[in-house]
Image (tube, grey):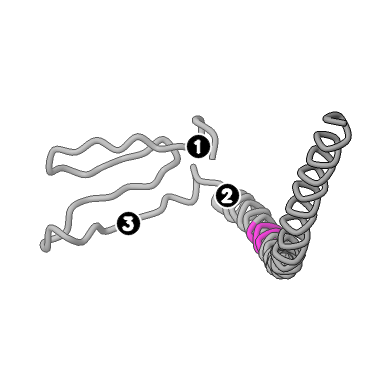
């Protein structure tokens, strides 16, 4: 509604009047307002059509928001499933890697011990040969 169509209501206990010909006055019960429309000054049909078009636009926006929210929700669900699969794959690979490290670690220890024995034997033989 534009500013030219907005009615300014003034209080004070007396009748309230707008620029469009809508008059209100306080009823006996203070929670109720009586409304009298002066058809000579009001173009209410145009206002109703304008409100209907605005309501239709709001409905379209709400539907677009709903479809976008559904799309985002589906995307997040797919992303969560992908993350769960990736986490399971990493966990399996870590288990395999740990098993491989344990097996190769014992092999490495054996290789180091054999190398140390070989070096000790080589130094022993060299010391025996160099004494002669």
Pointers 1 and 2 in contact (C-beta within 8 Å): yes
Instruction: Say whether residue 8 is visible.
Output: yes
Tell which of 33 and 118 is nearer to you. Answer: 118
Separation of residues labelled 2 and 3 (CA atoms): 17 Å
The residue indicated by pointer 1 is 5
Q: Residues within 10 Å of mark 2 (few under 14, many from 20)?
A: few
Tell which of 26 and 94 is nearer to you. Answer: 94
Q: Secondary structure at mark 3?
A: strand
Residue 74 lies within the magenta run: no
The residue indicated by pointer 3 is 35
Q: Which mark is residue 47?
A: 2
Pinpoint residue 103: horizontal percent, then vertical percent. Answer: 75, 66
Q: Quadrant of the C terminus?
A: top right
**Nearer mark to the viewer, of 2 and 3:** 2
Separation of residues labelled 1 and 2 (CA atoms): 9 Å
Q: Which residues are magenta?
A: 62-69
Residue at (61% x, 57% y) in the render:
55
User: Which tag, 2 or 3, sits closer to the chain's start?
Assistant: 3
**Nearer mark to the viewer, of 3 and 1:** 1
Pinpoint residue 29: horizontal percent, then vertical percent. Answer: 12, 63
Say above or below: 115 vs 86: above
Residue at (63% x, 51% y) in the render:
54
Separation of residues labelled 3 and 1 (CA atoms): 17 Å
Residue at (72% x, 68% y) in the render:
99
Q: Secondary structure at mark 2?
A: helix
């Amino acid at each position: 509604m534009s500013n030219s169509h907005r009615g300014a209501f003034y209080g004070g206990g007396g009748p309230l009047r707008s620029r469009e010909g809508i008059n209100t006055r306080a009823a006996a019960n203070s929670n109720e307002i009586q409304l009298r429309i002066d058809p000579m000054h009001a173009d209410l049909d145009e206002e109703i059509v304008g409100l209907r078009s605005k309501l239709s636009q709001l409905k379209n926006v709400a539907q677009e928001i709903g479809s976008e929210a559904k799309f985002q929700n589906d995307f997040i669900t797919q992303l969560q499933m992908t993350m769960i699969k990736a986490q399971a794959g990493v966990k399996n690979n870590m288990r395999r890697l740990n098993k491989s490290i344990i097996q190769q670690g014992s092999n490495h220890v054996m290789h180091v011990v054999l190398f140390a024995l070989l070096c000790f034997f080589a130094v022993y033989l060299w010391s025996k040969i160099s004494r002669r």
